[in-house]
Amino acid sequence: MSVGILLLTHEDMGEALISTARRILGRIPLALDALAIPPGSDFDAALRAAAARVRALDSGDGVLVLTDVYGATPSNVAEKLLDLGLTVHRVSGLNLPMLLRTLNYPEHSLLELAQTAASGGRTGIRIDHG
């Protein structure tokens, strides 16, 4: 078994990141899916859709939910997944380095993968001094 990954994002950002990760890595070693939550979406409908995706991705080790903006609707939906009794960890601030780092450690537990995702997202951000 392994951890599943769900990208909850505004618009189609998640699908674009998955497509890019596939081109870079070739093979995706974890169950991976994305759900776009457009502006003005019904919160309860989005929560039901996200819960269905989590259940489909969870092979017994839980699901890492990566969201784009903390405090926005996709992140708030992810937070409510815990209230449904689902085994999830949410990490916000989704970027491509975060996703790639996460996919490179398919053997990690849910908690380890959440920490790996956060670390990958942070270390993928650099300021050039010029």
Image (cartoon, grey):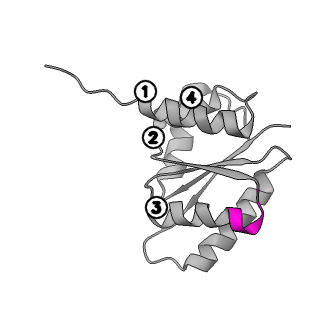
- Whether pointer 1 and pointer 4 mark residues with C-beta atoms closer than 8 Å, the reply is yes
Residue at the spot x=54%, y=27% of the render? 24
Circle 3 — which element?
loop
Label 3 or label 4, whichever comes before in sequence order = 3
Q: Which residue is mark 4?
A: 101
Labelled disc at residue 95: 2
On the picture, is 92 further left or further right than 34? left
Prevailing SS of the magenta stretch: helix
Q: Which residue is mark 3?
A: 11
- Whether pointer 3 and pointer 4 mark residues with C-beta atoms closer than 8 Å, the reply is no
Q: Which callout, 3 or 1, points to the residue nearer the camera?
A: 1
Q: Alpha-carbon distance for marks 1 and 4?
A: 10 Å
Quadrant into which the N terminus falls: top right
Q: Amino acid at mark 2?
A: Asn
Q: Which callout, 1 or 2, points to the residue nearer the camera?
A: 1
Q: Alpha-carbon distance for marks 1 and 2?
A: 11 Å
Label 3 or label 2, whichever comes before in sequence order = 3
Residue 8: image location, x then y, percent? 56, 57
Q: Which residue is mark 1?
A: 123
* Whether residue 65 is situated above or below residue 79 in the rendered picture: above
Circle 1 — which element?
helix
Task: Characterize the local packing of mark 4: few (<14), some (14-19) or many (20 or more) Cα atoms within 10 angstroms.
Answer: some
In the figure, residue 115 lies in which quadrant?
top right
Bounds of the magenta segment: 82-86
Q: Nearer the viewer, residue 87 or 20?
A: 87
Circle 2 — which element?
loop
Label 1 or label 2, whichever comes before in sequence order = 2
Residue at the spot x=54%, y=50% of the render? 15
Label 1 or label 4, whichever comes before in sequence order = 4
Label 4 or label 2, whichever comes before in sequence order = 2
Q: Amino acid at mark 4?
A: Arg
